[in-house]
Amino acid sequence: MLRRLPLGSPRGLRPPPAARSAVTAVPLAHAEVGVRGTRPPLVLLHGIFGNHGNFQTVAKALVRRVGGQVLTLDARNHGSSPHSPLMTYEAMSLDVQHLLTQRGIDKCILVGHSMGGKTAMVLALQRPDLVERLISVDISPTSTTLISEFPAYISAMKSVNIPAGLSRSAARQLADNQLSSVVQDPQLRQFLLTNLVEVEGRYIWRVNLDAISHHFADIMSFPVFHKPYPGPALFLGGSKSPYISSRDYPEIQRLFPKADVQFIEGAGHIVHQDKFEEFITAVLNFLSSP
C-alpha cells in the first residue's frame, strides 16, 4: 500500500563545500539483463556496503514485466569494481557517466537506493540530459545522520581476524561472532558478511573500508546544487524508515520540482527487499506516468 505525501516550500541554500580535487572515473563492474528497447535503459545503483546483486531480482522482474534493458552496477570500492582512495558523490557520478558512455547510452532512467540514490540525484543534477527520470529509494538530497553507528561497524569489520584454511561457512560464522558485539542486528551482520571473500586462501573484505571510513562525512552529506533537475522524479520511502521525512520536503522540491514522494506501508530502509511486489508496482507506475 502506497502513502503519498505533499511537498512543502523551498528552503534556503546551504553554504558551498570546500573545492574538490580533480576526479577520475573508474570502470564499474556491472551486469545487464534484457535487451535495449524503445525505453531508455534502467540503471540500478545499490547502497553502502552493497553490490549489484542487491538489485538483481528487481532487474529480472522489471525485464520480465515490461521488457527493455536493466543494468545493475557495483559502485567504486564495492563489489567487483576497482578500489580508489576517493569516495565522493562527484566521483561516483562520474563513474556512472563513464559507464553510460562506454555502453553507448545517451539517456537512462536512474534508480538508486540510499548511497546509490544520492549518486543518482547528483548525476541527474549534474547531467540532466543523460537522465530521463529518476527514482530515489529511501533517501533525500540532505545530510544523513541516522546511521552514525556505521563508523563503529567499519572499525569492527577492520578488526575481524580470520585464520587461513577455514571453510567459507566456518569463516563467515567466526566473522559473525566477532562482529556480534558491535553489530547487534543479525540481518545487518549477514548483509555486511556478503562482503567477506576468499582471496588466495585468505579472507578479506572486498569493500574498501579505508576509503569509506575516510569519506564517511562525504557519503552522509550531499553536495550543494543551485540549478534543479527538470525531469520527473520519485522519492520512494519505507513507512517504517526515518530516512525521508517532512523536514526533507523543501529541499526535495527545490532541487526536484517535479518530484512525487511516496511511502510503502510496512517497509523499512531496504524497501525493495521488505516489500518487493509493492516496490515493483510503484516503479512500474512511475515508468508509465507522463
Image: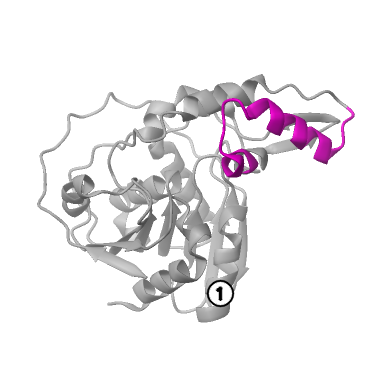
- Left or right: 128 with respect to 22? left
Foreground of the two, 181 or 5: 181
Figure check: 22 above or below 60? above
Q: Main secondary structure of the magenta part?
A: helix
Residue shown at 11%/48% (left/top)? 10
The boundaries of the magenta stretch are 165-190
What percent of the width, then of the height, locates residue 144? 34, 37
Find residue 233 and report its image quarter. bottom left
| Disc 1 residue crowd, few under 14, some 14–19, many 20+, Cα 10 Å | some
What percent of the width, then of the height, locates residue 209? 57, 27
Whether residue 172 is visible here, answered yes or no, is yes
Please name the residue that numbered disc 1 is placed on. Answer: 63
The question of residue 31 being in magenta is answered with: no
Residue shown at 54%/55% (left/top)? 102
Foreground of the two, 155 or 51: 155
- Left or right: 91 with respect to 168? left
What secondary structure is marked by label 1?
A: helix
What percent of the width, then of the height, locates residue 171? 79, 33
* Numbered marks: total: 1
Find residue 198 and report its image quarter. top right
Whether residue 86 is visible here, answered yes or no, is no
Q: Quadrant of the N terminus?
A: bottom left
The single residue placed furthest to the right in the displayed view is: 165
Residue shown at 38%/27% (left/top)? 217
Foreground of the two, 142 or 83: 142
Q: Amino acid at mark 1?
A: Val
Q: Colour scheme used in the picture?
A: one colour
Q: Quadrant of the C terminus?
A: bottom left
- Left or right: 157 with respect to 239? right
